[in-house]
Image: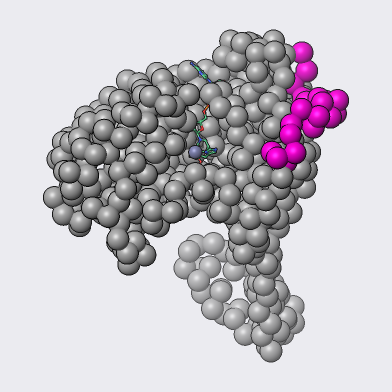
Amino acid sequence: MKIISANQFMMHNRHNLDLTQQGVALDDTVKSIIDKVRKEGDNAVKEFTELFDDAVIDKLTVSDSEMEKAKNMVGDQFVESLQLAAKNIEAFHRNQQETSWFTDNPNGITLGQKVTPIEKVGIYIPGGKANYPSSVLMNAIPAKIAGVSSISIATPPRPNGSINPYVLVAASLIGVNRIYKMGGAQAIAALSYGTETVEKVYKIVGPGNTYVARAKKWVYGDVAIDMIAGPSEICIIADESANPSYVAADLLSQAEHDEEASAICITTSSTLANEIAAEVTKQLSELERREIAQKSIQNKGCIILANSEKQAFDLANQIAPEHLQLMVSNPSAKLSLIKNAGAIFLGPFSPEPLGDYLAGPNHTLPTSGTAKFSSPLGVYDFIKRSSIISYSKQALLEVADTIDCLARTEGLKGHAMSIQIRRDSVL
Ligand SMILES: NC(=O)c1ccc[n+]([C@@H]2O[C@H](COP(=O)([O-])OP(=O)(O)OC[C@H]3O[C@@H](n4cnc5c(N)ncnc54)[C@H](O)[C@@H]3O)[C@@H](O)[C@H]2O)c1
Ligand SMILES: N[C@H](CO)Cc1c[nH]c[nH+]1
Ligand SMILES: [Zn+2]
């Protein structure tokens, strides 16, 4: 793993931003997939599924018998683990529930905000390079708590046309309405615009690779999206108190997701930097997904040698990583230095995978620097708010002249008339 200075990192990043050709090619691919699915519906989805997932699909939906078969394929330990994770995720997300509120004033004015669940939601569950039953829990549980009545899952099929049984069992545990065998940009397009089989949804949530993340960006506006939740990222700020083997393991935990994943460590200690680099090499050789992790470490991984603690935190805020681990002494005292991160893990015994599976907070998190303005997925992503305004006759008469003045100033006589007609009818 390369060790570079903060300046080298900044230069490299600037250089990377200039490499827009890659982004343009990705956009062209994604846009052409979306257009074809809009025009040709199911047939296009099936064509892309054959091309990208190597699977020939007859029916796009998972049948009841496939669900039953999946339940017989998974072991008790998995189901028990899933149940414990679900319990923690539900308990955490219940705190995010929002309710309608109304303010009643004595002069006949009632104002308020009505909270309504979004009716139809599509959840993308990745499935290209790994299987993510945990993402089913992370996305479907907050949707259920919010009261979404129609939940559709889209996830890519395996080459034999089936869906991973662990994903199906997780979906059955939470109770979703339908599961579609489709992945990538074609799934995002089908959920956004509908096809003969796929029901159009109002909002799409869930993580995915660069094709999925980019497709969500392109359909935004025709449907809502949660955020850009693309290839996984971890940034670890470590000081001399950190155990290099823990740091290396945590970096690799995210590198193994995808060649496009990013694993970065920032430290002021060159001794620690060398120890972490050596550990990464050692632990890489023990990984099953060695090739993916190795490419990710080569492409996007680095250890940055900062010249001060302030520079370390400034850099982390600039990167705005999906996951930020503080492997420093007294980590909670440093929380106030962090402005941008999807999830923050404090101390040596709060490693990132704890959050991926079990702790309770959501693992669907903003990537690519979007933690500067986005939050983790939550119950709040599955609701919308409507304002409530109710005035009595008397209350309206008292403000009629004020509204009249403002409306006429804007040159909107129709607005003024709407008030005047009421005032004149009661005077
Ligand atoms: N940010 C988060 O919250 C979060 C959470 C979990 C996982 N992730 C990320 O999700 C991603 C999962 O990726 P994955 O690949 O395993 O599954 P995926 O389901 O996201 O992607 C697989 C799909 O990508 C499409 N695809 C692949 N190659 C293509 C090509 N050349 N042209 C067009 N389309 C192509 C195919 O349609 C395929 O079905 C990883 O990057 C992981 O790090 C992120
Ligand atoms: N680390 C991923 C989010 O970037 C979530 C995940 C699911 N399973 C394992 N990891
Ligand atoms: Zn992970």
Give the residue displayed 64% in from the left and 49% down from the top: 85
| Bounds of the magenta segment | 58-79
For the stretch drawn in magenta, the main secondary structure is: helix
State left or right for residue 204 relative to residue 43: left
Judge whether residue 134 can be spotted in this image: yes
Q: How many marks?
A: 0
Question: 63 and 168: which one is in front?
Answer: 168
Query: Residue 292: image x %, image y %?
Result: 42, 23
Q: Quadrant of the C terminus?
A: bottom right
Is 74 in the magenta?
A: yes
| Residue 38 visible somewhere in the drawing | no
Relative to 411, does residue 228 appear above or below in the rendering?
Answer: above
Q: Quadrant of residue 199?
A: top right
The N terminus lies in quadrant: top left
Foreground pick, 85 / 382? 85
**Residue at the spot 56% in from the left edge and 73% down from the top edge:** 404
Q: Residue shown at 42%/45% (left/top)?
A: 322
Q: Quadrant of the rendered structure where residue 113 is?
A: bottom right
Q: Is residue 328 left or right of residue 56?
A: left
Residue 83: in magenta span: no
Seen in the picture, residue 8 relative to 161 is either above or below; the reply is: below
Residue at 25 percent across and 45 percent down: it is 266
x and y, in percent, of residue 72 in the image:
81, 29
Does 88 sit above or below residue 134? below
Give the image location of residue 389, x and y in percent: 67, 71
Measuring from the top left, give residue 41's x and y in whole percent. 69, 19
